[in-house]
Image (cartoon, helix red, strand yellow):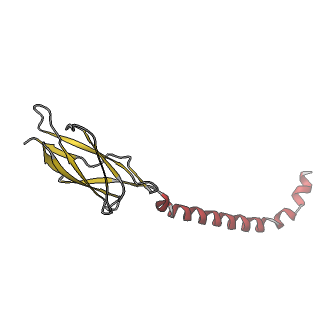
């Protein structure tokens, strides 16, 4: 039986065409994968951050302007900004919606504890609906210093 297979030369006849087909299929698959990988940024999500103005404030009632920006520092409209006490205290959670320039205006009244020299107010962002934005990482905080 092995002797008959050993002398049979027909198996070699189909080998070159099979190699060509495998090469064409492999190159086509690689092309599709590379095209998919190059388009990942377009279908991915972008992290948001806030830019409070001023970045440092004192205790007491203050007008704070917060800009919501994307990863390339572009303003993001229709996002909801939530201010909450972190190491500085707020009497209540405050929310505001960003305008077309990504700006939200808030009135905050931060306080510090006894013998506390400074503290922070944290901001959370609810991204606009239907967008490619998310807010998973910590955002820039507002520093509150004692007067």
Residue 124 appears anywhere in the view: yes
Q: Position of residue 40 (x, y in %)?
A: 50, 60
The tally of labels here is: 0
Q: Residue at x 20, y 45 (%)?
A: 108
Residue 9 appears anywhere in the view: no
Q: Position of residue 48 (x, y in %)?
A: 35, 53
Q: Residue at x 73, y 66 (%)?
A: 21
Question: Where does the C terminus fall, quadrant-wise?
Answer: top left
Q: Position of residue 94 (x, y in %)?
A: 27, 44
Q: Is residue 146 above or below residue 114?
A: below
Q: Is residue 63 above or below residue 20?
A: above
Residue 132 lies left or right of residue 125; in this view the side is: right
Residue 100 lies left or right of residue 13; in this view the side is: left
Q: Quadrant of residue 119?
A: top left
Q: Nearer the viewer, residue 103 or 24?
A: 103
Q: Quadrant of residue 133?
A: bottom left
Q: In the orientation shown, which residue stands out farthest toward the top?
A: 114
Q: Residue at x 39, y 52 (%)?
A: 127
Q: In the orientation shown, which residue stands out farthest toward the left?
A: 147
Q: Is residue 2 above or below residue 34?
A: above
Q: Residue at x 87, y 57 (%)?
A: 6
Q: Position of residue 99 (x, y in %)?
A: 31, 59
């Amino acid at each position: 039986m092995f002797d008959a297979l050993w002398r049979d030369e027909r198996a070699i006849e189909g080998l070159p065409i099979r190699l060509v087909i495998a090469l064409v299929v492999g190159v086509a698959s690689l092309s599709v994968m590379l095209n998919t990988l190059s388009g990942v940024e377009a279908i991915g999500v972008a992290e948001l951050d806030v830019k409070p103005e001023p970045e440092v404030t004192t205790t007491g009632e203050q007008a704070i302007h917060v800009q919501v920006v994307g990863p390339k520092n572009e303003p993001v409209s229709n996002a909801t900004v939530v201010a909450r006490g972190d190491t500085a205290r707020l009497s209540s959670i405050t929310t505001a919606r960003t305008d077309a320039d990504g700006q939200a205006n808030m009135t905050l009244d931060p306080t510090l504890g006894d013998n506390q020299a400074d503290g922070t107010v944290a901001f959370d962002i609810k991204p606009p609906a239907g967008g490619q934005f998310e807010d998973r990482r910590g955002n820039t905080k507002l520093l509150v210093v004692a007067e």
